[in-house]
Amino acid sequence: MDFKTKVELTLDLLYTRKIMKNKILIILLLTGVTLSANIDNGKDVYAQNCANCHSVNMGTGMGPDFNMVSYTRKKENIFKYIISPSTMYRKFGYSSNAMPRLPIPPQDVDDVVEYIDSLQPFKIWMKK
C-alpha cells in the first residue's frame, strides 16, 4: 500500500469517526429531552395554555386539534413552533399565524410536546 492510499484511508477513518461521534451526540441529546419530559405536566401545561384554542378530541377551536398535530408533526417541529410560531407558521403550511408566543419555560415546552406526541401512537411518516 502506497503512502497516498494510507493517507486516504486514514482520512476516511477520521471522517467516519467524526460522523459517528456527531450521531451519538445527537442521540444522547434527543434521549435526554425525552427522558426528562413529563407527560402529566405536559397535560397540565396544555390545560393552562393551549386548551382555549386547541382541542385533543376533534372539537372546535381556532387552532388545529392536537391529535392531528401529533399524527402529522414530529416532536422537534412542534417544539420549534411553540417556541417561535411567527417564524414557523409558513414551514407548517399555514398562510397566517394566529398563535401568540407564550411565556412557557423550556421544560414545560418539552413536557407539552411530549404530551402532544403521546396522543397518537401512529404517525403519518410510518405509512408505507
Image (tube, rainbow, N blue to C red):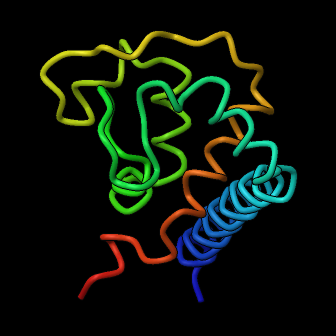
Name above or below for residue 71 compared with residue 59: below
Query: Closer to the camera, 111 or 41?
Result: 41
Query: Residue 43's image quarter?
Result: top right
Residue 76 x/y as whole percent: 53, 45
Name the residue rendered at 27%, 82% in the picture.
Answer: 127
| In the rendered image, the vertical position of residue 80 relative to residue 21, given as above or below | above
Question: Furthest-front residue in view?
Answer: 59
Side of 94 where 109 appears, left or right: right
Quadrant, the C terminus: bottom left
The percent coordinates of residue 16 (x first, y second) are 62, 69
Report the residue at 45% width, 42% height from top: 77
Expressed as whole percent of the image width and height from the top left, the position of residue 47 reads 64, 34
Residue sitting at x 42%, y 55%: 57
Residue 44's spot in the image, x, y percent?
74, 38
| Quadrant showing the N terminus | bottom right
Direction left: furthest residue: 95
In the image, residue 59 sits, relative to residue 85, either above or below, namely below
Seen at 54% across and 29% down, the residue is 50
Task: Out of 44 and 25, give the one closest to the viewer.
Answer: 44
Which of the 4 image quadrants contains residue 24?
Answer: bottom right
| Badge count | 0
Q: Is residue 103 above or below residue 117?
A: above
